[in-house]
């Protein structure tokens, strides 16, 4: 099965393997020693890399050496380039917009002149302000609850009126 280059670089372990064998040719054991996973796991990663065409295995005597073919990464580079150009254009547009906004902020703000009131108007205004300050506070009436009338223990009929003796 032929795999995609993007599948190969999707896994961080495979990216590290590509980085290792890009600098010099290593045998399978040397590659496996660099990782904390089992040798069969590394062999599977290398198999995927060879199916993608990013790694080539050469037999030299009893040893098998891995060599990187980084030319296949141009497919990834070309794909990424499209987005790089798009984002650069967007960032350039953003830079222009920010420069315009900053230029507007630096422009001097013209303040309206406040006209001073005439002397008579000024005196009236001061008088109003003084009245406001000196006005006595109105007393606050507290609401009280109506008290029920006190009970009169004396009856309207004299005590001796009903007495039998």
Image: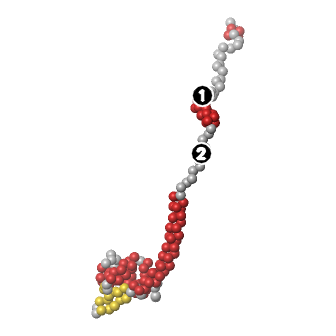
Please tell me whether mark 1 sits on a helix, a strand or a loop. Answer: loop
With respect to residue 146, does 157 lie above or below? above
Q: Quadrant of the C terminus?
A: top right
Q: Nearer the viewer, residue 96 or 162?
A: 96
Label 1: how many residues lie within 10 Å, few (<14), some (14-19) or many (20+)? Answer: few
Picture coordinates of residue 115 (x, y %)?
Answer: 61, 43
CB atoms at circles 1 and 2 under 8 Å apart?
Answer: no
Judged by depth in the image, the label closer to the viewer, 1 or 2, is 2
Q: Nearer the viewer, residue 79 or 136?
A: 136
Q: Residue at x 38, y 86 (%)?
A: 69
Task: Report the residue marked by disc 1.
Answer: 136
Q: Residue furthest front?
A: 119
Q: Is residue 136 left or right of residue 85?
A: right
Q: Residue at x 69, y 10 (%)?
A: 158
**Does residue 140 appear anywhere in the picture?**
no
Picture coordinates of residue 137 (x, y %)?
Answer: 59, 29
Q: Nearer the viewer, residue 112 or 75?
A: 112
Please tell me whether mark 2 sits on a helix, a strand or a loop. Answer: loop
Q: Is residue 15 left or right of residue 116?
A: left
Q: Is residue 87 left or right of residue 28?
A: right
Q: Is residue 6 left or right of residue 156?
A: left
With respect to residue 163, does 68 lie above or below? below
Sequence-earlier tag: 1 or 2: 2
With respect to residue 111, does 83 lie above or below? below
Picture coordinates of residue 21 (x, y %)?
Answer: 34, 83
Q: Residue furthest top?
A: 165
Label 2: how many residues lie within 10 Å, few (<14), some (14-19) or many (20+)? Answer: few
Give the alpha-carbon distance from disc 1 to disc 2, as whole Å.
Answer: 33 Å
Task: Report the residue marked by disc 2.
Answer: 114
Picture coordinates of residue 50 (x, y %)?
Answer: 40, 87
Q: Residue at x 66, y 21 (%)?
A: 149
């Amino acid at each position: 099965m032929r795999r995609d280059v993007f599948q190969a670089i999707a896994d961080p372990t495979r990216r590290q393997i590509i980085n290792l064998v890009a600098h010099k040719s290593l045998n399978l054991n040397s590659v496996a020693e660099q990782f904390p996973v089992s040798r069969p796991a590394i062999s599977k990663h290398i198999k995927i890399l060879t199916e993608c065409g990013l790694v080539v295995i050469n037999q030299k005597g009893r040893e098998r050496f891995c060599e990187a073919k980084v030319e296949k990464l141009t497919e990834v580079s070309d794909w990424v380039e499209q987005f790089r150009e798009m984002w650069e254009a967007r960032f350039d547009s953003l830079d222009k917009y920010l420069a315009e906004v900053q230029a507007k902020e630096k422009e001097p703000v013209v303040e309206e002149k406040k006209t001073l009131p005439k002397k008579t108007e000024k005196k009236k205004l001061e008088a109003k302000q003084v009245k406001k300050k000196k006005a006595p506070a109105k007393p606050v009436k507290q609401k009280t609850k109506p008290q029920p009338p006190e009970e009169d223990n004396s009856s309207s009929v004299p005590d001796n009126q009903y007495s039998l003796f």
